[in-house]
Image: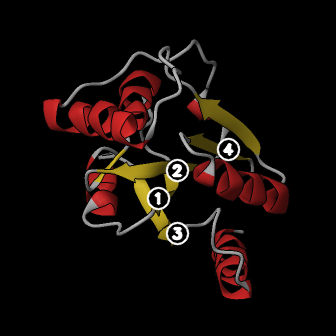
Amino acid sequence: MKTAVVYYTLDGNCALVAAEIKSKLNADSLRLQTQDEKKRGKFGKLLWGGGMVFRHEKPPLKPFSFDASAYELIIIGAPVWAGSPAPPIETFLSEAGIKGKKIALFVCHGGGAGKALKKFKALLDGNEIVAETDFKDFGKDKSEGTASRLADWVKGLS
C-alpha cells in the first residue's frame, strides 16, 4: 500500500513520530514548514501558535509538492495547540484537496490531546479515518511503552 506521512512539527516531537512511521512503513514523507520559521521562546510560541488557533488563522506555508491521488493511505500528524491541531495543518488541508482517501491521524502534545483529534477529523470530511492516536511528550518519554505503543499503532495500519 503506497503511504505518505504528512506532518508539521515545531519542537520536533511530531518529526520523531513521523520518522518512525516512515521507517516502519517505507512511506514517503512531507514535512510542512510555515513561511515564518522564526525561533521563539516558550511564551512567544504560546502567543504565536495559540493566537492563530483563536483567530482561526491559516499561516502561509513554504512551497510544497503533494499529490494525494498517488497514495492509498495518508498519515497526517500535528502538535496540539490550544486543544486543536496546529494551524499549519489546516493550511495544508485547505490547499491539498484530499478527498476519498484512507487517513490515519496522530497528534503530539505535552499536556492533553483535548478535542484535537475530533477537530482534526472534522477537517477531513469526505475521507475515511482508519486510525487515530495521540502521543504525550514523545520526544521526552523514552519509555519502552511509548515506543511499543507507536509500533503497535503502525502495525495496525499495514
Q: Are marks 3 and 1 in contact (CB under 8 Å)?
A: yes
Real-space Cα separation, disc 3 to disc 1, in angstroms: 6 Å
Q: Quadrant of residue 152?
A: bottom right
The residue positioned farthest toward the left in the image shown: 55
Q: Position of residue 5 (x, y in %)?
A: 65, 46
Q: Which residue is mark 4?
A: 4
Residue type of the residue flagged with mark 4: Ala
Q: Earlier in the sequence, mark 4 or mark 3?
A: 4
Real-space Cα separation, disc 4 to disc 2, in angstroms: 11 Å
Q: Which mark is residue 77?
A: 2
- Residue in view at x 73 percent, y 76 percent: 151
Mark 3 residue element: strand
Q: Nearer the viewer, mark 4 or mark 3?
A: 3
Q: Which residue is mark 3?
A: 135
Q: Are marks 1 and 2 in contact (CB under 8 Å)?
A: yes
Q: Earlier in the sequence, mark 3 or mark 2?
A: 2
Mark 2 residue element: strand
Real-space Cα separation, disc 4 to disc 3, in angstroms: 19 Å
Residue type of the residue flagged with mark 1: Val
- Residue in view at x 70 percent, y 54 percent: 16
Residue type of the residue flagged with mark 2: Gly
Real-space Cα separation, disc 1 to disc 4, in angstroms: 16 Å
Residue closer to the observer: 94 or 87 = 87
